[in-house]
Amino acid sequence: MKQIIIIGGGAAGFFCAANLDEKQYKITILEQNSDVLQKVKISGGGRCNVTHACFDAKELVQFYPRGNKELRSVFSKFQPGDMMEWLDQRKVSVKVEHDNRVFPESNSSQTIINTFLNEIQEKNIEVKTKCSVKEIEKQDEKYVVRTSLGDFEADVVIYTTGSSPKSLKMIENLGHRIVDLVPSLFTFNIKDDLLKDLAGTSFENAETSIPALKTEESGPLLITHWGLSGPAILKISAWEAINLAKVKYHFEIEVNFISKDMDEAEELFQNFKQSNPKKTIGQSKIFEVTNRFWQRILEVSKVDLNKQIANVSGKEMQAIVENLCKKKFQVTGKSTFKDEFVTAGGVDLKEINFKNMSSKLLPNFYIAGEVLNIDAVTGGFNFQACWSEAWLISQDLNNN
C-alpha cells in the first residue's frame, strides 16, 4: 500500500486527508505544534469564517491579489458552494451573513475542527503532533522525511506547512524558487490629532487611497488605538503588500470618511445651514458620523462648537469638508491584523501544475495552502483557496 505523508496539520492538510481514499493509501499527517488546525480555531474571532458566498470562479478570483489567474481553473472544479455542500453532507449547517461571509450555524470553529477530526478518525489516518520536520530527501522513487520523531518514508508527499520561513527554506532546498515573504493583511499605524482617543469609532463606508501608488479601496473603516483598520484598510494592504514593504510602511494615505465628494458635502452643508440657521454647529447632525467624531472634526478644523451654523464662514466650512472628505494621514508602520496573519510570497506559482496542485519539479509531490505565493483579502477567501487546492490533490490521487 502506498504511503502518503502530509506535512502540516492545518486547513489544507486536513481537508486533503479528509478526502483521500484510505483504501488506496496509508496516510500520516505530521504537525510540529501540539494542536492541529490552529488557524481554523482562531478564524473569525473563534467562529471560523469557513468560506465566502461567491459562486462564480471569475468573480471569486477578484479577491486574490496573488494567485487570481491560477485559481480560476481551481475554483471551476471546487468552489464555495461545493465546500458548503461538503459540510452539509456531514450535518454541519452554515449561514451566510450580510457581507457574504460564511460561518457554521453554531458560531464555533470547534464544529469545523470536530468534523475534520471525525473524518480523519473514521479513515484511521495517523496524526503525529509535536513532530518537527527537519528535511526531506529524495531517494530513488521515494522520499525520506526526517523529523524530530524519526524518519518516515513516503511514496507521495503533500506539503501544506503554511508560510513559515523554515518550511520555505526546506522546499527551496528541494529546488523550488521562493518569492520573498511580506505581510499581507495589516492595519496602518497613524498618530494624528483627528484619531486620538477615538478607538472603536467606525464608518460604514469610507474611501481610502494611497496617492503615490494610484490605488484606492472602499468599505467599512475603523479607528483603533494605533491608527486605522477595517476592510477599507485591509484590502488596500493586501493589494499593495509588496509596494508598502518596499517603502518600509512609511507613506501618505488619503481618507474620505463619508464617501461623498467635496462638492456634494458642501451642498449638504449649505442646505443644512439654510434650514437650521440658529443651531450650534457642535449639535448639528449634517453627516453620518458619530457626535464624538464630528466634534473632533470641528476641533481639528478650528471651528468653535458653540457657533451658530449661520455664522460659520466659507473658509471654516471648507476646512470641515476637507477633513471629512480628503484627510491626509502619514502612516508610520503596520500592526498585524488580529491573529490571522497572512503573508504574500511563498513557492513560485510558475512551478505548480494547477490542474492537480503537483510540483512541476518533483514527482509525486503536491503543494497547497499558504506556503504558495497566493493570498486573499479577509472574508473566508484564504480558507477557500486551501479547500479547493486540497480537493484537487485528493481527487488526483484517488483517481491514480
Image (cartoon, rainbow, N blue to C red):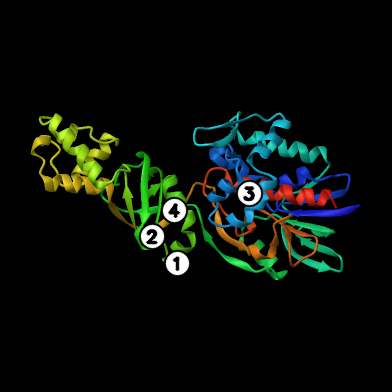
* x then y, percent, for residue 371: 64, 58
Q: How crowded is mark 1: few (under 14 residues within 10 Å), some or many (20 or more)?
A: few
Q: How far, Cα to Cα, is label 2 from label 4?
A: 11 Å
User: Which comes before the other along the chain, label 1 or label 2?
Assistant: 2
Q: What's under tag 3, amino acid-wise? A: Ala
Q: Is residue 211 visible?
A: yes
Q: What's under tag 1, amino acid-wise? A: Lys
Q: In this view, does 360 lie to the left or right of 48?
A: right
In the picture of the structure, the residue carrying the numbered disc 2 is 214
In the picture of the structure, the residue carrying the numbered disc 3 is 385
Please tell me whether mark 2 or mark 3 is closer to you in this view. 2
**Which quadrant would residue 168 be assigned to in this image?**
bottom right
Q: What's under tag 2, amino acid-wise? A: Lys
The answer to whether mark 4 and mark 3 are in CB contact below 8 A is: no
Marker disc for residue 236: 4
Q: Can residue 11 be seen in this view?
A: no
Q: How far, Cα to Cα, is label 1 from label 3?
A: 27 Å
In the picture of the structure, the residue carrying the numbered disc 1 is 246
Give the secondary structure at mark 4.
helix
Q: How far, Cα to Cα, is label 4 from label 3?
A: 20 Å
Q: Is residue 38 above or below residue 245?
A: above
Give the secondary structure at mark 3.
helix
